[in-house]
Amino acid sequence: MLEIRDLRKQYGPIVALDGATFTARRGRLMGFLGPNGAGKTTTMRCVFGLAAPDRGEVRWDGKPIDRLARLRFGYMPEQRGLYPRMRVGEQLSYFAQHHGLSSRAADAAALRWLERFELADRRTSKLEDLSHGNQQRVQLATALVHDPELLVLDEPFSGLDPIGIATMSDVLRERAAAGVAVLFSSHQLDLVEDLCEDVVIVARGRIVAEGRIEDLKEASGRRHLDVEVAGAGSSWLAARDDVVVIEQKGDRVRLLVGDSVDLDAVLVAARNAGPVRRFSFGPPALSELFMEAVQA
Amino acid sequence: MTRRRAIYLVARREVRERGRSRAFLLSLVVTVALLLAGVFLPALIGGDRADRLGIVGAAPAGFSQAVSASATQAGTAVHVEAIGDVAAGESRLRDGSLNGLLVIPASGTPTYEVKERQNELLGQIVASSWSQLRVRDLLAQAGIGADQLAAAATPPTVRELEPSDPNRQTSFLFANVGVVLLFISIFTFGTWVLTGVVEEKQSRVVEVVLSTIEPRDLLIGKVVGIGLLGLVQLLVMVSVGLGAGLAAGRISLPPTTGVAVVQLILWFILGYGLYSTALGVLGALASRMEEASNASSPVSFIATGSYLFALLVVLNDPSGVAARVATFIPPVAPMVVPLRTALGAIEPWEIVLSVAVMLLTIWGLFVVGGRVYAGAVLRTTGRVRLRDAIRAARR
């Protein structure tokens, strides 16, 4: 279990973290959300001792993290980077050895992960000779090669094509299923909603929401109502003050309503306007929870 | 996973990656080629250094022998050849295939012709041989015997009160070449540390590396790994240089050779340790390769200054005050001490004290520089100011 406790970090006049506290559990995928500059990268750097917090601490399994504990973590920094002229297989093995694997075990692990990403035939290629997508895979393999107990990935999906995203998602799910605590940041909120059970949202250095996505949705007073009335557009809603149109595409409108809205009344109004093609009611998407949380 | 293992891994990576890099192999081949050229080319090009003297007309008997003898005494050699006429001799003077032309008329005083008055020695040899023969002939005519003449011609024997070192020339050569090798090696491999640090920053890999190891260990591993390659290259250069020199017969190894080589290696290690650490720390302040040379310019300046100081000042007066003081100034000492040692102009205590000062300085640089490096190496945007790096490291 990774515990972030009351982290504060200031760079000159800029407060990057201002008392951030949250927990990432083993066997779970946790999405780490927040606008640019909210403090996600600084938090991750604090986990790896790359930035020293001015206050607060990071604990793993109840103990403060030291150099030896970090060897069991895997890290993919926001700014990707490996040795451009080093061969892929040797590079993976090198990082595995830095995590404490013997030379032989490291070679075997490197090969295993290259096979997993279908790069085994490129193991003697220099990294710089690989395509961008394949370099990304090697970067992920670097974070995974030593079978870490905690995975911290900064924007792992950025720059990936749909196939790459699918592979990355599979790997993250598989690692979580194997008992690894996975914490990753992303701006692709639909993806996070799809993949994660837990999220933590940071804004201006503070945690503004944390927990299971389902619980957060449930706790939100906001609800969505998607309605489509053929040929009516949104004109039939003009007189109502209990709904707000947040999106309109042709005859299809997305409405924001309170959880105490009178659905029957809305449905009647829609029927009066024309044939109803769609009428669905539900909690807001993660992206809306996010906007709500960071703008509050 | 101990810190020592982490340092070992970093050093091993440097040796493997750079050891098979084109840059290293090329630098090895080029330096060896330069050394071989330096040793063998003079022998090939300037093999025959003898002056050529042409003679027109009949020379007195024994003249050629007299010229050769005088030449040998003067430490040179002269080939004498007969030339058909003055015109042919003069044209050969002009094209440089003769250095001097002696025209001996049937009667009267001979003329000695040269293209321009340059090689006064040949003229003196010719003049003295000529007059020597003439005087001998006159004396013989006056009835003085050959034995008496020979006895009178015997030069006084020479006794040296303070005989010079028979290997002085070789020592001088060693000292010169040694300083050049040290300067090249220290600076080449020190610069590799600089570029290595910047490359890691520029490719952002440093953040991945530092998620498992301490910044100082990364710097130490890098310095050690690249230093081993430098040591290999230095040893190859020294072996090739000595081997080729012996093979070409240009040097004979004085008994101090072993000491000189050991000192060369010792001072490479010390000098490289100092300069590469400084360059590595400065490299951490740059974020791109273009900034690296700017960041390192103070160190380059000091290194070049020390090198010139050694060659221009210490070589001329290895026991002078300047040389003695420089022995204890760490950036200068790696080039001064081996030079003074090779010239036999240093006391053992000076060497010991100088090494101690060097070691202390390197240690201090690692402590202070290690902090600066740690504070700066993760800042990948723009050039980091020294003050900011130190401040960041304190946290």
Image (tube, coloured by chain):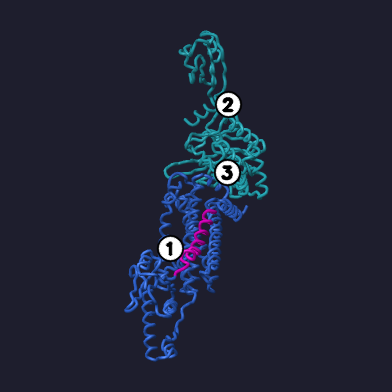
Q: Mark 3 or mark 2: which is in front?
A: 3
Above or below, comparing residue A150 to residue A257 in the picture: below
Is A45 located above or below residue A195 in the figure?
Answer: below
Q: Nearer the viewer, residue B32 or B21?
A: B32
Residue identifier under label 3: A126
Q: Which mark is residue A125?
A: none
Bounds of the magenta span? B24-49
The residue lying furthest to the front in this view is B106
Residue B41 magenta-highlighted: yes
Colour of chain B, in one word, is blue
Give the position of the N terminus of chain A as an image quadrant. top right
Q: Regarding mark 3 in the picture, which secondary structure is present there?
A: loop
Residue that badge 2 annotates: A218
Q: Amino acid at mark 3?
A: Lys
Q: Position of residue B170 (x, y in %)?
A: 49, 71
Q: Determine the main secondary structure of the stretch shown in magenta.
A: helix
- Percent across and percent down for residue B72 are 44, 77
Residue to which mark 1 is pinned: B307
Chain ID of residue with mark 2: A
